[in-house]
Image (tube, grey):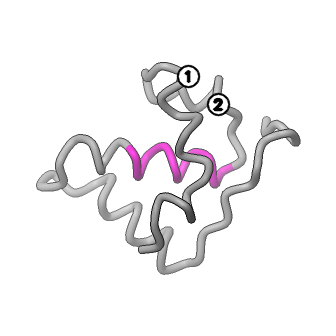
Amino acid sequence: MGDTRLPAVALSDAERLTLENWARRRSTAQGPAQRAQIVLACARGWNNTVVAARLGIERKTDSGHREFPAYGQL
């Protein structure tokens, strides 16, 4: 399901756990929670079209989150 032309998103166990907590927690603001969901989906190997369809977002919204380390380490 992943597109080999897209950069892989590699997460450590600690980063994955933190992002999963942010995505699930009700007190997390909507923006960071959605970014966490996008990064987790990209880490699963989904391409931008699949991520956008499954999360109900625009494809261009998700394409910028593949460069997760540039976004900031946790």
Q: Does dot 1 land on a helix, a strand or a loop?
A: helix
Residue 74 x/y as whole percent: 41, 74
Image-quadrant location for residue 28? bottom left
Mark 2 vs mark 1: which is more N-terminal?
2
* Residue placed under numbered mark 1 in the picture: 59
In this rendering, the answer to whether 58 lies above or below 39 is: above
Query: Quick check: is 72 in the magenta stretch?
Result: no
Residues at marks 2 and 1, CA–CA distance in whole angstroms? 6 Å
Residue farthest along the front direction in this orientation: 70
Q: Amino acid at mark 2?
A: Asn
Q: Magenta-highlighted stretch: main secondary structure?
A: helix
Q: Is residue 3 left or right of residue 59?
A: right
Horizontally, residue 30 falls left or right of residue 22, namely left
Q: What segment carries the magenta color?
A: 35-44
- In this rendering, position of residue 53 left or right of residue 31: right
**Residue occupying image coordinates x 60% and y 69%:** 11
Q: Amino acid at mark 1?
A: Arg
Give the residue at mark 2. Answer: 48
In the image, 50 versus 73, the foreground residue is: 73
Relative height, residue 17 to residue 48 (above, below) = below
* Above or below: residue 32 compared with residue 6: below
Where 18 sits versus 23, above or below? below
Q: Locate residue 25, reporting x and y percent.
A: 21, 57
